[in-house]
Amino acid sequence: MRALVNKVLEICEEINRLIGACNRCSKCCHYRIPLLEEDKQRIENYIGDTLKELNGYIEPPCPFLEKNACKIYPARPLVCRIYPFLLLNEGLFLVNINECQLAQKIYKMLGGREKANIVKISLSQLEDLLEKLTLKFY
């Protein structure tokens, strides 16, 4: 499972970097964010302090949000790193298509035409998208 998470993380970060469509609206920072133990440790190392008040979740609005910018961006949680994708036991999803400019752009690139706010996608679709983007930008 960890290999899959790492693969999705690597692809999502590269797609987000190549598309560059995030307009820093911070809407994604107003959801309850699950916090893995590794996320908590990474954040603690980054800020140089312990996070006793975070018990598995970051409650909205994110306490690390300041003027629509993430104060811990290099150490942000996994969920934030792969956004607007969400990896669940049920599969990989593109989420908040109606609210997120980046998600809208990705949805169109995946061939989405129907009005949807969340769609399930396969790892192969994600890999194909990265390949298209890589060919386009390099």
Image (cartoon, rainbow, N blue to C red):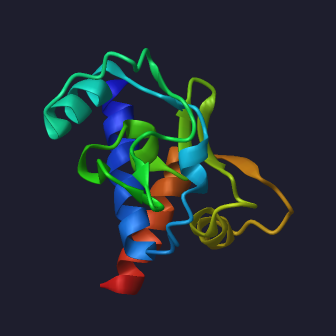
Q: Dividing the picture into quarters, in which one does residue 75 lie?
A: top left
- The residue at the far right in this view is 115
| Whether residue 36 is situated above or below residue 79 in the rendered picture | above
| Residue 13 appears in the figure | yes
Where does residue 83 sit, x and y in percent of width and height? 50, 50
Task: Write the residue at 17% across / 39% down.
Answer: 46
Where does residue 34 sit, x and y in percent of width and height? 49, 27
The quadrant of the image that shows the C terminus is bottom left
- In this picture, residue 127 sits left or right of residue 134: right
Task: Write the residue at 43% across / 14% down.
Answer: 55
Where does residue 131 sit, x and y in percent of width and height? 41, 68
Say which of 106 and 24 sits in front.
24
Say which of 113 and 67 sits in front.
67
Task: Write the residue at 60% across / 44% down.
Answer: 30
Say which of 80 and 30 sits in front.
30
- In this picture, residue 23 sits left or right of residue 137: right
Please count the marks in the image: 0
- In this picture, residue 4 sits left or right of residue 48: right
| Residue 122 appears in the figure | no
